[in-house]
Image: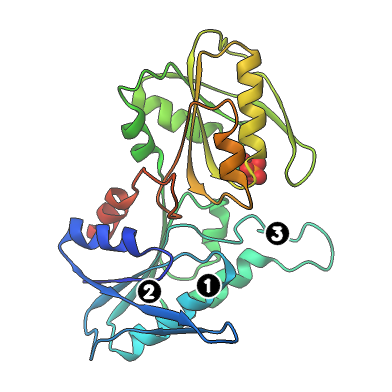
Amino acid sequence: MIIVGGSSSRDLAKELAAILGYTYVQAATTRFPDGECYTRIDHKELNDDVVIVQNTYPDGNMIEMFLLQDAVRRLGAKTITLVIPYFGYARQDRVFKPGEPESARVMTRHLGLDCDHIITVDIHKESVLDYFKCPHQDLKAAGPIADYFKDRGIDLVLSPDFGALGRAKDVADRMDLLYDHLQKTRLSGSDVKIAPAEVDCKGKHVLIVDDMISTGGTIIAAAQALREAGAESISVACTHGVFVSNAIERLTGSSLDTILCCNTLENELSHISVAPIIAEALKR
Ligand code: R5P
């Protein structure tokens, strides 16, 4: 098997190849002066099962993925597996207002034109995967997150809202801890209101888990509510650190004690690796 690292996910792709003992091939991707994507795999042939590791966010990375699919097929790939650590557009999984596109379906349709298997990690809406016609699998980052925080004195795991309670439970169960959820009301794209959890947080070392941090609004409001409820320390771990505009500065300047994310998106806070769970899935 050959692992091809797209420009968004080179470190993760290299780590996967090292764990599995597979060949790592790096795509050389640049931009033309007008911004169009150019990519090249400098090999005569890839006559093997090929795994492309590349995000579909931001938009330019989606285009790179399309080009890589074509490049590896032309080089003789027997099968193509797409590993999409962070799948963009999963939040627009339906038409909310007349006249909108069903963005997630558009993306899956185009990605699915030439691939044999798709692996994602904590996709925002699992129902989006059903749009793929080929076999697909969504991996959960709860294991790597729980492994990281095990033995770090956490007492309680919380999700910011009821919808994400399953993730908090998954992490808490692996650490043998209590879990609960906060009550989130979204006021705007970047502002949310958080009501306290039912469980008593006073004097507790709390870990908040979420699938993604985008503006940071959710986590900052959650941290404030937990401070008011008397939490002793507040850590946060998310799968995808999207961190738009100045989110990292806002988060590091807030009352949070620890902020970490997985390396589905590579950035200065992505210290929890999902490579072991992806490697397991590829082996299977
Ligand atoms: C919402 O459903 C997600 O799980 C996240 O809580 C949300 O996308 C985080 O966004 P932000 O960081 O902008 O509050």
The answer to whether residue 110 is above or below residue 92 is below
Relative image position of residue 94 (x, y in whole percent):
70, 59
The kind of residue tagged 2 is Asp
Q: Nearer the viewer, residue 152 or 156?
A: 152
Q: Is residue 96 left or right of residue 173?
A: right
Q: Nearer the viewer, residue 86 or 126?
A: 86
The answer to whether residue 165 is above or below residue 43 is above
**Marks 3 & 2, CB-CB < 8 Å contact:** no
Which residue bears the numbered disc 1? 62
Which image quadrant is residue 104 in? bottom right
Mark 3, mark 1: which one is toward the viewer? 1
Which residue bears the numbered disc 2? 116
Looking at the image, the residue that sits furthest to the left is: 21
Q: Please report whichever mark, 1 or 2, sits nearer to the chain's N-terminal start.
A: 1
Q: CA distance from mark 3 to mark 2?
A: 25 Å
The kind of residue tagged 3 is Arg
